[in-house]
Image: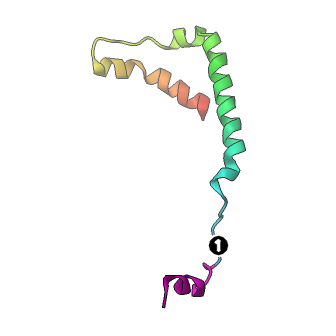
Amino acid sequence: MTIATCFATEQPPARSDHFEQAVADSNPLRVAQANELEAYIQAMKQDSTALRTMLHPDYSSPKAFEASLREYRAAFCNRIG
């Protein structure tokens, strides 16, 4: 028996109940999301007022720096969901 014969007699895989779609099918959505995020970042870069009122990093120690960024990180998480 040859390898070609083994492959020729294999049964096709059973149908899955799970959602299956080629990853490439979601490329247009992922590109649109990336473009939206980039546009948002560019708009935020134009107005740094909110950032300057919220971000006051404390560089005196790593722990102080981490603590000084809590409000900024929370606001960032709220904005991006």
Quarter location, residue 42: top right
Outermost residue toward the left in this view: 61
Magenta segment includes 34: no
On the picture, is 31 further left or further right than 8?
right
* Residue for badge 1: 17
What x and y, as percent, mark residue 44?
63, 17
Categorize mark 1 by other alpha carbons within 10 Å: few (<14), some (14-19), many (20+). Answer: few
Residue at the spot 58% in from the left edge and 30% down from the top edge: 78
Compared to residue 67, the image places residue 8 above or below, namely below
Residue 67 versus residue 43: which sits nearer the camera? 43
On the picture, is 17 further left or further right than 71?
right
Compared to residue 45, the image places residue 70 above or below, namely below
Residue at the spot 49% in from the left edge and 21% down from the top edge: 72
What x and y, as percent, mark residue 13?
60, 78
What x and y, as percent, mark residue 67?
37, 21
On the picture, is 54 further left or further right than 49?
left
Quarter location, residue 11: bottom right
What is the three-letter code of the residue carrying label 1? Asp
Helix, strand or loop for disc 1: loop
Start and end of the magenta stretch? 1-14
Q: If the image is split into quadrants, where does the C terminus sit?
A: top right
Residue at the spot 43% in from the left edge and 24% down from the top edge: 70
Residue 57 versus residue 31: which sits nearer the camera? 31
Residue at the spot 66% in from the left edge and 41% down from the top edge: 30
